[in-house]
Image (cartoon, helix red, strand yellow):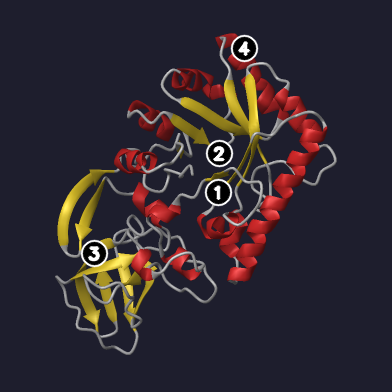
Amino acid sequence: MRPHAKTHKSVTFARLQVGRGAVGICCAKLGEAEIFADAGIGNIRLPYPLNPVNDDRVVALLDRTHLSFIVDHVDVARGWSRAMEAAGRTVDVLVKVDVGFHRCGIDPEAANAAVFIAAIAELPGLRFRGLLSHAGHGYGGTSEAEIEAVAATEARLLRTVAERCAADGVPVEEISVGATPTARFSLQQEGLTELRPGNYIYYDRTQVGLGAATWSDCALTVLARVVTRPAADRIVLDCGSKTLTNDLARGFGPAPGYGVVLQAIDAEAPDESLLVERLSEEHAVVKVLGGESSLQPGDLVRVVPNHSCVVSNLMDTVWVVDGAAVVDQLEVSARGAVT
């Protein structure tokens, strides 16, 4: 287990995850990794195609944590090789494999996939560890069976590439996968060595829609206040796009709006009569379906966001609560660390 810390960006939560058995964490960018390394997290992986222009930052990180990252382009890999040789260092790398999301990664079915990996493994200054993928297209699944099929295909493609590498004399020690919707099915697959889910620590409306969580699993909510009610069928909250973000929800059925308002401060179920239909920067316009709601200016509500990772990055502080009681206040340590 190697959770992706880009969801919570919290040193406190990262320490809890490692303390409960995680081998380390993932970070999206070097800025995040620097903050977590400074806090004593000793094993950090960046499943991101870093450019060698950042060689000085990587070399500095190697003195503070066990660092690894991905490569999927030969010129970039050669650049990192030159940089590590010049610094007299060696860094762990994994080859990113495109298992269907079509963002980054080599084509696992290309005839030269194993040849590419063998070339990476031979570069000085780089220590080839294995293969890494992200089945982000699982977020587009329309059923549990479809998400399960994504996880199975991901594992099969990675195993096939690993077998081809082994036949060419290149051992693949690690096969790393990461996505919260597919994680429950990846656990059933053979040959995988690492899971990297991130969103699971909070969950959100999308994960509920994809069957990865229930409403009671959703740990992150936005506390908002009704600022005005200009009409019987319209309520305005003080949580606009700078709070909830403009991300839309995904799932097996329709999921309109920009989050769901819970029935009460201490409730877990959504109020189906309230639709967060549009956002301005500082305003969330809520449509009252049927015109019946007791909410008035000054009232507080809790909103489950569509995408908790983005909301987390917009906040300085996480308030830990038990029901309506505040238990603790935690800093979002790596907020804004996107370089």
| Mark number displayed over residue 85 | 4
Res. 270 mark: none
Determine the image quadrant of residue 119.
top right
> Where is residue 154 drawn, in percent x and y?
67, 52
Q: CA distance from mark 4 to mark 1?
A: 30 Å
Amino acid type, label 1: Gly
Q: Which residue is mark 1?
A: 178
- Viewer-nearest of labels 1 and 3? 1
Residue marked by disc 3: 224
Q: Quadrant of the rendered structure where residue 146 is?
A: bottom right
Q: Mark 2: which secondary structure?
A: loop
Q: Earlier in the sequence, mark 1 or mark 3?
A: 1
Q: Pick whichever, 158 or 209, lies toward us.
A: 158
Q: Residue at x 41, y 21 (%)?
A: 64
Q: Kindly give the residue lying farthest to the right in the view shown.
A: 111
Q: Which residue is mark 2?
A: 47
Whether the residues at callouts 1 and 2 have beta carbons within 8 Å, the answer is: yes
User: In this image, 296 relative to 283: left or right?
Assistant: left
Q: CA distance from mark 4 to mark 3?
A: 53 Å
Front one among 243 and 217: 217
